[in-house]
Image (cartoon, helix red, strand yellow):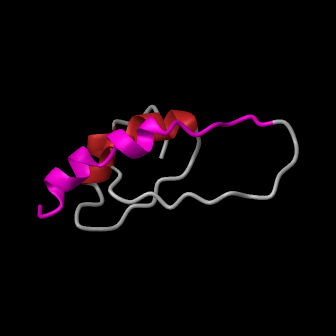
Amino acid sequence: VRSSMDPEDTLRRFAGRVVFIGGGPPVWDAYARFVSHWDVTRLPYDGPADRWFDARWLTGGGEVARNHRDQ
């Protein structure tokens, strides 16, 4: 998926299926409200960081996913 794609339209194409969202901050900003389960892993890396993780994605996400779970 791309951050420019409308999340509702994109996810509607996969109704009833588990969708894995990968990418970076722009994608997570667009899709966080639909995520009901986060699987966050850390990779061994000692170089300069070019990405970051906003904790608000964890605390504010999933509201839409919970509302649509039975549809």
Q: Residue at x 30, y 60 (%)?
A: 14
Q: Is residue 70 magenta?
A: yes
Please say if 44 is above or below 62: below
In the rendered image, which quarter contains the C terminus? bottom left
Which of the pair 15/58 is nearer the observer? Answer: 58
Which of the pair 14/67 is nearer the observer? Answer: 67
> Residue 23, how many percent across, how many down?
57, 46
Residue 56: quarter of image: top left
- What residue span does the magenta drawing correspond to? 49-71
> Residue 16, how many percent across, how many down?
23, 67
**Residue that sits furthest to the right in the current view:** 47
Q: Is residue 23 magenta?
A: no
Q: Residue at x 18, y 61 (%)?
A: 69
Question: Total label count?
Answer: 0
> Residue 1, how many percent across, how many down?
47, 47
Q: Residue at x 47, y 53 (%)?
A: 21
Answer with left or right where residue 68 lies relative to residue 44.
left
Please say if 50 is above or below 62: above
Which of the pair 49/68 is nearer the observer? Answer: 49
Answer with left or right where residue 55 lies relative to residue 6.
right
Answer with left or right where residue 71 lies relative to residue 2.
left
**Residue that sits furthest to the bottom in the current view:** 17
Q: Residue at x 49, y 39 (%)?
A: 55
Answer with left or right where residue 10 lies relative to residue 20.
left
> Residue 45, how many percent across, how many down?
83, 52
Please say if 54 is above or below 66: above
